[in-house]
Image (spheres, rainbow, N blue to C red):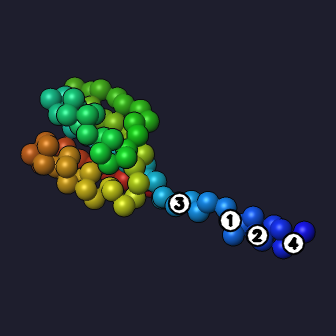
Amino acid sequence: EVALDLERVRLAQRRHIVERVHARIHCEFAAVPLLYSRLADFDAHRLSEQASAEGMSLEIEVPGERIEALTEFVRNLTRGRGSVECAA
């Protein structure tokens, strides 16, 4: 029976575990449509959003390995006025 269990484990599909991090993106309203359209490119998922007089704040979840690329994209999209902050 133990040998059977070991064989099942050996034959089971391997799953790639991806560390996901929570982050908050702050940007002006003008950048929001393009930002929304590109989130999937970073495998990012919107969790919540909040509008203020200064613009939009989005809470997202993104693979840890993609956070630097997303941060650079937001910086370029907003010409340095937007930001990405990783949640603690």
Q: Find out whether the residues at labels 4 and 2 contact each other: C-beta distance under 8 Å.
A: no
Residue at point 27% right, 51% down?
70
First in sequence: mark 3 vs mark 4: 4
Is the Cβ of the residue at disc 2 closer than 8 Å to that at disc 3?
A: no
**Between 36 and 88, the one nearer to me in the picture:** 36
Q: Nearer the viewer, mark 4 or mark 1?
A: 1
**Residue 55 in view of the camera:** no
Secondary structure, mark 1, is helix
Q: Position of residue 68 (x, y in %)?
A: 28, 59
Q: Position of residue 37 (x, y in %)?
A: 26, 34
Q: Quadrant of the C terminus?
A: bottom left
Residue located beneath label 4 in the image: 2
Q: Residues under labels 2 and 1: Cα distance?
A: 6 Å
> Which residue, given by chain and number where applicable, does mark 1 sit on?
11
Of circles 3 and 4, which is in front?
A: 4
Dot in front, 2 or 3: 2
